Amino acid sequence: MLKQLNVRNFALIQEAVLNFDDQYTVITGETGSGKSILLNALHLLLGERADYKVIGNNGEKAIVEATFLINETEFSHFFTENDIDPEQETIVRREITRQGKSRAFINDIPVQLTILKEFTERLISIHSQYNTLDLKRKDFQLQTLDLLADTRQLQVEFSTLYEQSKNVYKTIETEREKLDQLEKDRDYNDFQLKELEELGLEKNNFPNLEEQLLRFENAVEIQQLTSGIISGLGNEGAVIDQLQSLKSIASRLGRIDKEGQAVEQRIQSVIIELKDIETELSESAGRSEESNEEHRQSLTELLDKYNRLLLKHKCTDQHGLQALQNQLQQTASNTDELRNTITRLEQDFAELKKQLHTVAGELHTQRVKAVSTIEEKIQDSLAELKLPDTRLSFKLEQQEKFNSYGNSSLSLLFSANKGIAPVEIEKAASGGELSRVMLALQQLISEKTQLPTIFFDEIDTGVSGDVAQKIGNLLKQMGTTMQLFAISHLPQVAAKAKHHFKVEKAASGETVQTVIRPLSYEQRIEEIARLMSGETINEAAISNAKALMI
């Protein structure tokens, strides 16, 4: 509940500290006294856009602060999610400055307006005559029906499934678009992959193959040069023979000088190395490269294709082509995986649709069952509000198409008089009738759920006499289960309140201020009498005021 409201430098209110209690509180005051200022201050706490013109003349900023008694457990998730210290007495503050800045706080923690709005909308509901237009909104009608029919939890279950199905369907569409694009590119990708796979990049070493082809292409010259080396090494009188002679000389030297032994060994090592070279070259010369022309041709073709693909794909070496091949193979794998993903998602979507049909059917059935009882209760409430011939009925039809409320199509039908065929309420009811219909609905809703603190702004506009008396009794009854405020100009409505505040203007020098003060029992009698008879209050008005307050 709202425990305290502190308003400073806001429009004509210099400072007002208002302490509130539970049950029904009425706020009265002459036209133009500033009752709307109080509501505008509350609207700031509900996160509405700030109008910087409302800043008063006593400083550079206006402040609206409210203290709420809350159930900490109920709001524990909110406090944890927004890193706010939970307090049973939670303080909400809004500040606006002449420089165009606006700040919001919950328990002195700065918060964004969206966070403030999320919090305070669960605590305060302001209902003006304008808000009766809510009755003309289809979503409001269905929300109201679900609250009164005790189907709200089932509707939330359906709404959750509905959002899940929408998200899954959206994901399916996104994945299908990806698959379509992959399919469009698939033929070309497969062609490129086939070209790369034909190279045998995993088994072939193309730098080595290039060296092999170079030997093929220079086989004659290689043969000639090899023969020249072999001859220079092994022919009679060639290098090896000369080294053998040198070795013999070193051997004789070694017999008389140890250094000669070392020289002999080193010459012997050179001879061995040169003989190995001669042997290897001889074996190599024995293999005829020219005789394998078919292999040379296939090697040429393979390397031509390799170099063409290097140029085509702008790669510098074999590793680049292998990376591209792996990427194309992965793309092919992704295509198959994407098909499997879409199949799984389609199965999930089918299951969700099945659940949606089941829950929607149950939801519609329960709504239909509850309608007649709800209509009877509304009828009783409207009769108490002096609308005995008014009829309000819920016409439900089941549709194939779903929305977040199920597949029930609802028309709220209204007839103000006997013999008049009911039509949709948005086409029939007057403002005064809508106000009373809304009040009747609010009464039934208050019996079903714990509503936040409610402010009724002149909900009694357009009525008087016995109707006003009935509205006063109804507000008093609603106040027994919730904190309720009503701004009213009718004595019958004001007299039924448990608490009473009066708004009035007070002159101070050349300035005028709005003052809001609680009234004592005697002051209440006087105020109600004033509402009945105007500024001239006589004993009859006093007596009538006392009678109304019983």
Image: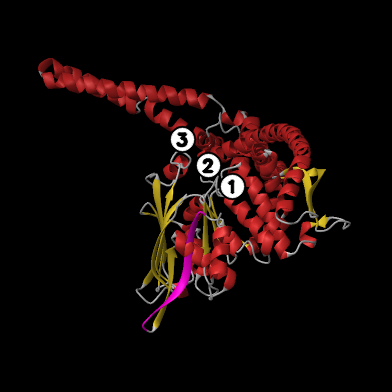
Q: Would you say the magenta stretch is mainly helix, strand or loop?
A: strand
Q: Is residue 192 visible?
A: no
In the picture of the structure, the residue carrying the numbered disc 3 is 225
| Residue 479 screen position, x and y as percent | 55, 49
Check the image and report above or below for 28 versus 476. below
Is 43 displayed left or right of 413 in the figure? left
Q: Is residue 237 magenta?
A: no
Residue at position x 68%, y 47% in the image: 144
Q: Are marks 2 and 1 in contact (CB under 8 Å)?
A: yes
Q: Earlier in the sequence, mark 2 or mark 1?
A: 1
Residue in the foreground of this view, choosing between 326 and 271: 326
In the picture of the structure, the residue carrying the numbered disc 1 is 313
For the record, the magenta segment spans 498-509
| Residue 106 screen position, x and y as percent | 40, 53
Dot 1 falls on a residue whose secondary structure is loop
Tag 2: amino acid: Gly
Tag 1: amino acid: His
Color scheme of the displayed model? secondary structure
Disc number at residue 320? 2
Residue in the foreground of this view, choosing between 194 and 245: 194
Rounded to the nearest whole Å, what is the CA distance between mark 3 and mark 1?
39 Å
Q: Is residue 502 magenta?
A: yes
Dot 3 falls on a residue whose secondary structure is helix
Q: Are marks 3 and 2 in contact (CB under 8 Å)?
A: no
Dot 2 falls on a residue whose secondary structure is helix
| Residue 67 screen position, x and y as percent | 41, 53
Q: Residue furthest bottom?
A: 510
